[in-house]
Amino acid sequence: MPKLTIDGIEVDVPAGATVFQACELAGREVPHFCYHPRLNIAGNCRMCLVEVEKAPKPVASCAMPAADGMVVHTASEKAKRAQKGVLELLLINHPLDCPICDQGGECDLQDLTLFYGPDSSRFAENKRPVADKHMGPLISTHMTRCIHCTRCVRFANEIAGVEELGATGRGEDMEITTYLEHAVTSELSGNVIDLCPVGALNSKPYEYTARTWELKKHESVDVMDAVGSNIRVDVRGNEVMRILPRLHEDVNEEWISDKTRFVYDGLKKRRLDRPWVARAGKLEAADWRGAMAAIRARLDGVPGTKIAAIAGDQAELEAMAALKDLMGELGSPNLDCRQDGAKLEGARAGWLFNTTIAGIERADALLLVGAFPRYEAALVNARIRKRQRLGGFKIGRIGCPGDLTYPTTDLGAGPQSLVDLLAGEHSFAEVLERAERPMVVVGPGAVARPDGAAVVAKAREVAERFGMIRDDWNGFNVLHAAASRVGGLELGFVPGAGGRDVEGILQGARSGEIEVVYLLGADELDTRGLENAFVVYQGSHGDAGARVADVVLPGAAYTEKAATWVNLEGRPQRSKLATFPPGEAKEDWRILRALSEVLGHKLAYDTPAQLRRRIVEAAPHLGRIDHVEPAPWADFGGAGKLDDAPFVSPIADFYRTCAVSRASAVMEACVEEIRGQQLKATGSDD
Amino acid sequence: VLHDKDRIFTDIYGEAGAGLAAARARGDYDGLKDLVLMGREAIVDAVKKSGLRGRGGAGFPTGLKWSFMPKETDGGPVYLVVNADESEPGTCKDREIMRHEPHKLVEGCILAAVGMGCTAGYIYIRGEFVREGEQLQRAIDEAYEAGLLGRDIAGSGFDFELYLHRGAGAYICGEETGLLESLEGKKGQPRLKPPFPAMVGLYGRPSTVNNVETIAQVPAILRRGADWFAGLGRENNTGTKLFCISGHVNHPCTVEEEMSIPLRELVDKHCGGVRGGWDNLKAVIPGGSSVPLIPKSVCDEIRLDFDDLKNAQTGLGTAGVIVMDKSTDVIQAICRLSKFYMHESCGQCTPCREGTGWLWRVMTRLVEGRARPEEIDMLFDVSKEIEGHTICALGDAAAWPIQGLIRHFRPEIEARIKERAPAAAMAAAS
């Protein structure tokens, strides 16, 4: 361990650390722009110059390996002069338009100028203007402000895995641009906005709508996929102005997907802000009493077996628990949280991402089965790419073709390839055999099909056959795309004894065997035939479910409630209420609690705390927020014949997967421009 | 004064021909097998003892540089890279070698490869050197045909492949790590050091980048002995050197001379003197455009070598001696150089990208006297903000000429500002 002296403070640093990191360890702040701990070192901004004794010139601390016995001065005359000089040079061509710049208030250049910058300019020449570039519907550009730190270029190349950003020209004519001024075709592109230390790359939807200091910041959890990205919801008044990532090393690091970041305009459109009741086949505005009375009237005398409930992809733990309790009170075994028909239930190990997201970094071989993580869980994909870039990580894939941003060995299209692999008929079997910590990821494309249970059983065989299951390593993983899924499975929101699953419920509704269907935010269903049944839709958006409903109960969207979601690893995370639901809409568990009273089956809790106590009684690990309870290996999966059909990812369109994203104009713009570009690039529209 | 017997580049003017037969007649490849069989350590020791310093500008001791190459490797390739991207304004020595003595370079490559355990070599040649590239390629082909390159060179059992790669004419690709990037097919932008090329160089492999002249001098050193080379010039500034004298002399030329020759002697003996006589001299840029100029008072006594010029706050650089007589607008001359550095800055790091443009813009105003006197100090200060703060030496190269100008010709700049001041005041009043 090298020992250095930083401004008179002695520090021991781990081998391989840089002088910059040593300074951080010594508690000395070194100004910097281009350095970012998650990106390769560029050393081009020269802001982090420090004086190292015996070195003839100031040293860029971010790029200099720390060596034993170095004596570093971060604030000596020489170091200060270098830092001041660099900052002056950065500012000469910067427009200094902070009053109209969105970055104002959270700008690295602004902050560092305050401490290291000159108080006036000696630059008497004309400033260099740079033409703005088109980077798609998400990123607005003001390239004159660019300080050429190349963070965005490095992010695109290294983390997003799309080589579409770069610098053209040289000297003072160097400009950052996208390839032929196309939109960046990455689902992680929005992160360059956070990375940009100045106001060159800004959020296009957020542009000029608020100043940062007007915003109230609320910690929350994303529900656009099952990753459970930690987010910060910035609110002005009762309006979500923007969504930013929050650091969580084990989940999303400091990135979020574009859907997570930009979907929020969908929270303001197509909202259900009052109850509706159908009269003569047409929805009419109603009040809460009227709506609940209508439900009571219809349910009167209907046996429990003819009632069913389906929970949607964004339902939180609290609402699902309340609905499950209510269905129990009504005597109905027909409930399901797997609206895509995924054949997952039983032992926890059979439907969790057991390796954990951070655990991917410890794996040394990966087999994707019916998974397309780039769209199903963009940040799991980023983690896989991160691992892949470190080397020594072979990735095999069965089904779901397409560019995942890293190279894969394609083994086949459907379940038969799993059988072949087990028989050792593919060279990838050797890779798995030799690997010390191999992992398999079973995606929604493999389980949401009639032979899903049998596919899971085969994947389980693969895991056991190739040594993925040990005391210190569990390499069996299920990749979910729905935020509610693991929570629902934890609660046992699946058919009870003799109960119907989603498919059974829909069939029953068409045939008349099911008379009442309760949809808790379930919109991704085949709603044909549901008009025969009495449908209660409780949710936030007027989407597919509300269209077939007889009674609409307005609920809260994910930013409008303090609620718990369990991510695909089995990690319970809690959001905070950021805005209030619009109009008469209410938090979802409260609606169910009120309805239970109207129906004469009053649920035994009056506060969120009581409800959560009830959840924790049944499943204690759900009470340990941000803790992943490992699942013991057990028997799961089902028998049955394997189908020959290839695995197909259910997500054909990354930007439109839920009621919120379908209501979002920004997502619509992404579909038009980015998806359009991608299709063109692959030639699949010809 | 260099005697003909001590001349290394005996056909630098191309009188005898550049082909293999002519080269052999001059003594090239003579006893190559024995030289190769000297082995790695003996070669490096000889080069160290000769005192040879890099001829590309920085003057780093060549033997020492070679000794940085790892003694043992994992068996993968180790590269010799020859910097033939001669783009320094005022410099035309490597060009002459490649035109007329290409076999000296090829032979030097072989011996340097032995000295560093290289398996392959790349000569990165400036894009504008079209004919020189053809000549050099011809020499390489001839050498391959004669069994002097490839497998079992001259029966010595040593294998070495040599390739020629053409650049596209960017000055920054002459910086050693920028050159490596360009050679790898990337944008020519210098790399951060450390790691140094000897550890992580071309394609991530151990590599050494040497100048053409440096490499071409190696065979003579090994053949005639390190002591012979070390006996020329002064201590720490040994051997012979190709000087390229341009500008206001009667006969501009490239000439091989002994290191440490007095500037005045060089100009008078080989160039027919300064135009209009020595007293008509105004200033000299002694080592290519990147080094500060020196006024006549310094030129009178100075010797052209690394140490003497360093003491005069300038440098030997590439030994591209640019002579300016009294007819020169020295401010305009330096301004033109500033424009060159602005144009050739790669744009990667801040001080150079932003600073070179600033320097040039202030310089254009100084040329016309369109400035305030205190801006001279500001210009000097800005040049100091660039110097030593950049990834590569281009920042220094942009700063030094201006620093030299201000150091030696400040009164002239001030006079020009003053001269313009009444006119400007009148213009403002009307």
Image (spheres, coloured by chain):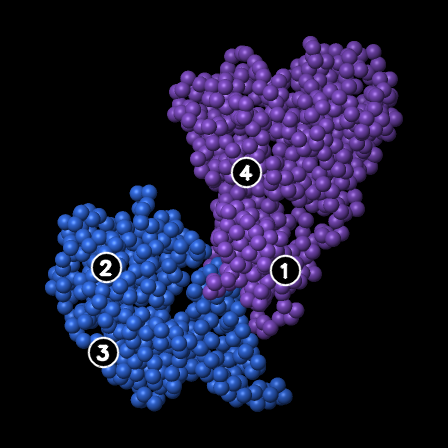
* Number of residues whose C-alpha sits closer than 10 Å to that of mark 3, classed few (under 14), some (14–19) or many (20 or more): some
**First in residue order: circle 4 vs circle 1:** 1
Image depth: mark 3 or mark 2 in front? 3
Give SS at disc 2. Answer: helix
Q: Mark 2 lies on which chain?
A: B
User: Which residue is labeled 1 in the image?
Assistant: A112
The reply to whether callout 4 and callout 3 are in contact (CB within 8 Å) is no
Q: For chain B, what colour was chosen? A: blue
* Number of residues whose C-alpha sits closer than 10 Å to that of mark 2, classed few (under 14), some (14–19) or many (20 or more): many
Residue A597 picture location, percent across and down: 86, 21
Q: Which chain carries label 3?
A: B
Q: The purple chain is which one?
A: A
Q: In this view, does B156 lie to the left or right of B120?
A: left
Q: Which amino acid does label 4 sit on?
A: Ala
Residue A225 picture location, percent across and down: 63, 33
Give SS at disc 1. Answer: helix
User: Which residue is labeled 3 in the image?
Assistant: B1
Give SS at disc 4. Answer: helix
